[in-house]
Image (spheres, rainbow, N blue to C red):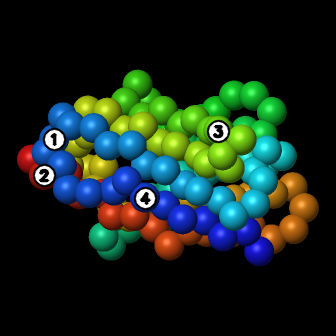
Amino acid sequence: QVQLVESGGGLVQAGESLRLSCAASASISRTDMDWYRQAPGKSRELVARIFRTVGSYVRESVKGRFTISRDDAKNTVYLQMNSLKPEDTGVYYCHYRPLVGNDSWGQGTQVTVSS
């Protein structure tokens, strides 16, 4: 199973930026990759997805502020988060979703945005 390690979370003030990284233990070049988040008391939700071919998706509430990118040579996916808001607070998880085989989740990284 592919192991995922997230990093880059922290405590910031509203309006500031963070860049999350997700390093995979194997190649991700043929795989769609996701960032999810889970706020306290809420369900886990998809924040952004980057496709194995071309293109990406970000949820409406973060559109224009968050950008997902990938570096397949480094087996790493990034989430650049700008203009952070308190409602962006939560644990952010990386998700590996292959066409064949088992998917994998990272352990999560905490993002806290103070007002």
User: Which residue is label 1 attached to?
Assistant: 14
Q: Is label 4 in a helix, a strand or a loop?
A: strand
User: Which residue is label 4 attached to?
Assistant: 7
Label 3 amino acid? Asp
Residue 61 visible? The answer is: no
Residue positioned 78% across, 40% down in the render: 52
User: Which residue is label 3 attached to?
Assistant: 71
Label 4 amino acid? Ser
Do labels 1 and 2 touch, CB within 8 Å? yes
Do labels 4 and 2 touch, CB within 8 Å? no
104 over 85 or under it: above or below: below
User: Which residue is label 2 attached to?
Assistant: 114
Q: CA distance from mark 4 to mark 2?
A: 19 Å
- Residue 15, image x, y percentages: 18, 34
Between 46 and 32, the residue placed more toward the observer is 32
Viewer-side label of 2, 3: 3
Q: CA distance from mark 4 to mark 1?
A: 20 Å
